[in-house]
Amino acid sequence: MIWPVAIGELHGVFSWLYSLLESTGLSQPWLDIIRYIVLGLVVFGVLCLIALFLVWWERKIAAHIQQRFGPMRHGWHGWYQTIADALKLLQKEDILVDTRDKVVFFWAPVICFVAAFLAYICIPFGDKLIVADLNIGILYIIAITTFTVISLLMAGWGSNNKYALLGGMRSAAQIVSYEVPMVASILVVVVFVGSLSMVDIVEAQSGWFTNWFIFRVPFGPIAFVTYIIAATAEANRTPFDIPEAEQELVAGYNIEYSGMKFSMFFLAEFANGFTVSAIAVTLFLGGWHGPFLPSWVWFMGKTLAVVFLLMLFRWTYPRLRVDQLMEFAWKFLVPVTFANLILGAWMKYAGWYW
Amino acid sequence: MFYYLALAALLFSIGLYGVLTRRNIIGILMSLELMFNAANINFVTFNKFVITDGMTGQVFALFVIAVAAAEAVVGLAIVLLVYRNWQGIKTDYINVMKW
Amino acid sequence: MGELKTQEFIVNVGPHHPSTHGVCRLMLTLDGEKVVKIVPFIGYLHRAIEKICENRTYAQCIPLFDRFEYVTSMSCNYIFAAAAEKLAAIEVPERAEYLRVIMLELNRIASHLIFYGVTAMDIGALTPFLYGLRERELIIDLFEMTCGQRLTYNYIRVGGVSKDIPEQFIPDCRKAIKIIRRKLVDYEGLLNENPIWLKRNVGVGYLPADLAIAYGVSGPVLRASGVKYDLRKDDPYSIYDRFDFEVACRPNGDCYDRYLVRLDEIKQSLRIIEQALDGLPEGPIKAKVSPNFKPPAGEVYTRIENSRGEMGVYLQSDGGKKPLRVKARGGSYNQLQVLPYFGTGGLVADLVAIFASLDVIMPEVDR
Amino acid sequence: MTKYSFIIALLPLLSFLMIVFFMRWKEKLSAWFSIAMILVSWVMSIIVLIETIGNHGVPYEAFYEFLAFPQITFQIGILIDALAAVMLVVVTTIGASVEIYSVGYMKDDPRFSRFFAYLSLFLFSMLGLVLANNFFMIFIFWELVGLTSYLLIGFWFEKKSAADACKKAFITTRIGDLGFMVGLFMLAFYVGTFNYGEVFDKVGAGLVPAGILTAIALFVFCGAVGKSAQFPLHVWLPDAMEGPTPVSALIHAATMVAAGVYLVARSMALFVGSAEASLVVACIGLITSLLAAAIAITQNDIKRVLAYSTVSQLGYMIMALGLYGFDVANGHHSPGFYAGTFHLMTHAFFKGLLFLAAGSVIHAVHTNNIQEMGGLLRKMKITAPAFLIASLSISGIFPFSGFWSKDEIIATTVSHPVFLVFTLLIAFMTAFYMWRLCFLTFFGEPRDKERWDHAHESPRSMSWTLAFLAVMATFAGWVGLPWLSHGFAGFVYHGQPYHPHASWLMMIISSIVAVSGIVLAYLVYYKRAISADMLANKFRLLYKLSFNKFYFDEIYHIILLNPILAFCRWMWKFDAGIIDGLVNGTAWLTIAWANVKQWFDVWIVDGAVNGSGWVVRQVGEGLRYLQNGAVQFYALFILTMIVLFGLWKFEFTFISVNWPTMTIIFVVGVTVLAILSRLAPSEAEADGDTKQEN
Amino acid sequence: MDAPVSLVFWILSFIIIVSAFMVVSLKNIFHCALFLILCLFSVAGIYLLLNAEFLAAAQVLIYVGAVSILMIFAIMLTSQLASKRISQTNENKLVAFFVCLMFGLSTLVLIANTHVWRYSAQALPEANVLTIGKYLMTDFMLPFEVVSVLLLAAMIGAIVLARKETS
């Protein structure tokens, strides 16, 4: 059964805008350039909005888990508290350490933010609501998010601070390690779909919700769980937030950053959290598919649900130790994901799935 | 096609220069990566322009990437070992081959 | 491969590091992430309380002792008052003793609740901190109701206590006990069997009993190493010998046991408070003591079981109205001293967990 | 299911790998995991057997060529025919029983998981051996079986006897394997393939010269002699009893020693082609059987008795197979093939049961010596009946399974009177020594009161296994009832199916023989009507021969070891006396001559050497800068030469500068720059960096 | 090459050459590593121009995501050597530069003078990734396995080499 396509799809707006643009009679290269600039700006706006919203949301969730209210004064339940914070961060003094590595120190937050931003290009926010449906989509996202590591290493090095250096190295070790199980979890789905394109992956899950990969027992749920664990580590969130571990490394790699540079790291972190959740939704939870409501609403709803899961982790679990973290990745997660991958591939090969 | 090959040749030469002159083993390894990449550019170029059907060039480039990764891993492990033993990773010090 | 040399790496943790609970500075020598050597530096919070006391009358010393260890300032009040009473041979009324026990135990619970939150926070779980403080709030409210203060109480005076408790105190206190009992189940459910919590704590920071005794470590840290030593039982002061309670003791001497011992102690303290509330007699709350009383010349040492171990005061009097010499002892000092000897060998993260489990509070170290 | 029968062999391998890599510290888990795996294999092999019966034993073959040379192709494949299907069931049944049994038997052993890992590996190799479709593969698994049996026999390697026994077993079987290998080489050379079907086709078509065929058959038989402990290589099997008892049951009853018989049965086509080889096989079988039975009569170690009994029974089977080959080669038809394989199957069950029950007894009384036992029937309510059932079966008492298979073997020998006499004699001896064992162990008064008091029934995992196997030992033979038209004989056959016909005469004779053996044992060891010592005194020579196992170990010692040792000693003497003398004499002479030379050397040669050395040194001083030990410098040198070569070879021009000019510019440039950079102050020495330390 | 592609190519080549030169000449080895990343990233762009999307992604993933991070790691672990005071090149500098220049020039001339490979661009198979996968699993099975073994060996070797002797 195909779910009824609801009205209110956003892609109509974009195609209408594009037809408007076409009617101006510009030549094709110019059209492309304008289109990409506009789309880039839109994605940028979406990213900022999402990050701002997530910051507020996380505050509220944390507060409610801890039996407090969180921001309440600014607007309804403090909804513009984050905006005020962002404005405050924007006008704060940019404190620069004298012994910093100037160029590296400057570029680290930029690269971090740009990497987070570039990943959004390939996320299908809804039916036909994707900036570029690359044929290597998921691989592209994985590849581009590795730049985050580099930015963290640059931040660690550029700050010329031992805590920052330790934080950067920890994060690099962690992300490189957890990338292996993450990719292996993703590959299960890729093997089944037979395509790396995000749109293809979502299309393969159309129909009744049992078509979602999370419901393809036994490998689907396993892959989902391992993916969520690895993704939590990738996004540097508790219980895997040892790179920032304020009780050990004070704030890890961003210890020397302040003002706008810090807020760029901050935004990128939340953007990354959203990215990994969006990937989880795309790969395992049927992407934008869902009845009655417009596709983008479904997508955002599911993604926020996954983000909510990550936040629950963050506010309930203690933090692991470095060696335990590595042990967990290599001794447990990697064998499990690979066994799962082999299982999935075998089932695909033998045709034992529905 | 000439441009691609020329680019690869220049990249290769620069990498070669690095390998020959760097004092730091890590620097040598980085220069080696440049040379690998030059080779890869050639592979992909030939794949695009010469081979009539198929992806042999790209497949080989993939192999080269894998080999380069292995090389980097082992190389860096050796670097760490040397560093621990000699408290330095300059090539000047590692002249055991003299004897 | 033969001998491999590794580059060691020195990091200063503190004095403004989030996990040093105040202003302590640890100079760590790291091998990678492994702690090779710990050198604690103290004195950032030195206020010369002992010296100032020499220029105050006995009654004036008590507010100073409030600041001696501000997390359990009731105990600090009590210890000085008890020493002075012993020196001047002052009889304390029955009701005052009961009130003192109630306050001491409430304050012990408050201290352990802070420990619970702070330890969890040091290990990365932020939520328990707020839980701990939420229940501590109940106790602080009780104190506020009694003496008008929320941190430095100045409640226990030489010869008794400053004020009688208000009417609302006893029902509120019983309610608080009930709530804390119920919430303790929550606490244990949140952390006790959490696998990450176990991984971070079990077997970490093993403090053998002989080392602990050799360094004079006392209190929950000592009891977690399997030494069943509690001054309330072994050298009863005040009226502790009238109450029925157990001494919490665990055998393993790791961070996890230190954490469990404190949770157990909260339960025992609740029992003591209940018994004290039941047996609270009517009567005066303060013996008649002159504000400028002059104890006879002599010296005295009193000690009590504080939430951080043995707390003691040594008083020397020359017969004047001011003490000749005051010397205070706090449990934190010894616990910090022993840290370099059993805290090495782990990772930085372990060190944070160990430091948190010792529950060191810096003003007690520096005085 | 037949299609997937390779999984049967792979499951134990999986269990081995899982235990080794993941479950080493989880003892219970590893045991139950391997048991689960072998049980799955068991069920699968039963299904395979049923399917094979369903399609009337038509072989199923599948293979994958993994190495193909023009001359010969190496395959990995499976061949499921009636024989293999039956063997699969037998091996997995015994394997599963032994594994379950071992849970109880090996409890508290420090290397518990390792034991199960070894068992699994052994089962994998044994099943692989059964499933193999070519000689190459069977050889690989053959060796694997040898390796794992080495590991298992020496499982308690702290015991010196066990360590020695495993080495002995390994080396002795290796002698046989050498022959097997030579056979394989000859096969590859003359036949050009290893695949069973192709080999047998070619042999059947007479493409192999008769003499060569005999040689091949005998060499292949060598392997069987080693593995199946046939004369003269039988000496390892009794010693191998040092291993844990489940291992004895698994290796020495059901599987590994049966591998030799299986090999002979499998390559029956080779023997059918050569009457001489077959006759040798039959004789070896008979001699082995007779010798072993004679030895078994006087042994006191319960497991050794069983071991010799095994050797004896294996000799029986080999003899039957050999006679079949002989008969068919001479144009007659014979039940030998069917009798041998049938006995292989029934023997596996009752001998496995015997070993396991013996293990249970040993477990109970903590001794192997039957003279210290007795009266155990009252103590062990499951073990003892099981043991007695198995004894009845091996003695050939109606209607236990041994009766049917033994009957067929006797029927095989009917046309060969000499064999018939000895066969009956062996049957008599078998009944006698088995019942001697039974009476000494289970009946009469306990001879060691203390041990008897401590004896107890074994845990459930052991006793239930025994009960299951007792059922099998009783009824397994019924598949070969002579009255069945589609019984075992119509299923497992070589060439043409043999249709057995019930011969009442033979049945009665064999029954009489068996019963008389039992009666004699009863009289001697239960009633004490005939004194055992008196018998021993009367047949003193025979008794001593038998008791000392016909001095085989000693004979080997004398005829093999002593000469080698003597040779070694002689070599040492030669070395010490003559060579050393020569050397010392030479040294003396050398010293004398050296003194003469010294003068010459110091004054004349040194002068020349120092002179030339001085010259060389001056040259080296100049050249040493080239040999500075830095790889980069060498690489640069190489690159320079490459460019030079390129300039010369390709003859291209730079913007109208021709190549000789170019070359000269290049060389001059390099030289000048090199000198320049050497002259410039080195930056490396300017900084205060850490110095090299070694 | 059509105009936009050509423009992109020139930009990318410029970045590659400049950053490669930085890699071999800068004194701060950490900066070198960063330029190496830039260079490799641009090479991925070149792959994109040559219709090798999968390879580009693999390049970014492996080189940028793994190899360079390892490099930076090693640099950080051996950090004291990265100081600017120490000369990062050895005394072969001048000769090596000259020889490499000659080598590059001669290669360029060689390429320019070779007329054998004047082909035009080919249309590549549409399903890029699928084709590569198929090739890996059929024609290049053996090299693929060999590379797998090589990677495994490298991994084990690295572990063995870098492991600290604990005794």
Image (cartoon, coloured by chain):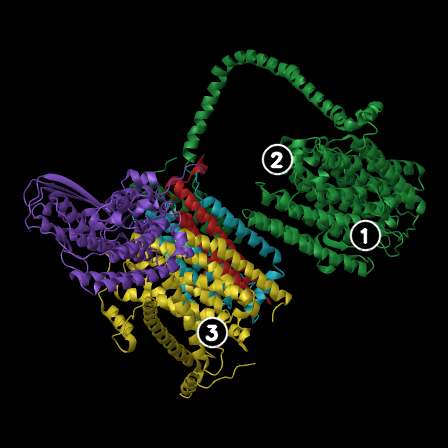
Chain colours: A yellow, B red, C purple, D green, E cyan
Q: Position of residue D663 (x, y in %)?
A: 46, 49
Subunit bearing disc 2: D
Rounded to the nearest whole Å, what is the CA distance between mark 3 and mark 2? Answer: 78 Å
| Left or right relative to D424: residue E156 | left
Q: Earlier in the sequence, mark 2 or mark 1?
A: 2
Distance between mark 3 and mark 1 Cα atoms? 65 Å
**How many residues crowd mark 1 within 10 Å: few (<14), some (14–19), many (20+)?**
some
Nearest to the eye among marks 2 and 1: give it: 2
Pick the residue in front: C282 or D231.
C282
**Relative to residue C288, is residue C207 depicted above or below?**
above
Do callouts 3 and 1 mark residues in contact (Cβ within 8 Å)? no
Q: Position of residue A268 (x, y in %)?
A: 35, 67
Q: Which residue is mark 3?
A: E2
The residue type indicated by label 3 comes to Asp
Q: Are marks 2 and 1 on the same chain?
A: yes
Q: Amino acid at mark 1?
A: Glu
Using the image as rendered, state which of residue A306 and residue C316 is in the foreground: C316
Helix, strand or loop for disc 1: helix
Left or right: B16 in relation to D559: left
**In the picture, residue D314 is in which quadrant?**
top right
Distance CA(mark 2)–CA(mark 1): 43 Å
Quadrant for the C terminus of chain E, please: top left
Q: Which residue is mark 2?
A: D157
Q: Nearer the viewer, mark 3 or mark 1?
A: 1
Residue at 93% over, 42% down? D414
In the rendered image, which quarter is residue E126 located in? bottom right
Q: Is residue D374 above or below residue C128?
A: above
Chain letter belonging to callout 1 = D
Identify the disc placed on residue A27: none
Residue placed under numbered mark 1 in the picture: D198
Local packing at callout 3 (Cα closer than 10 Å; few below 14, some 14-19, many 20+) is few
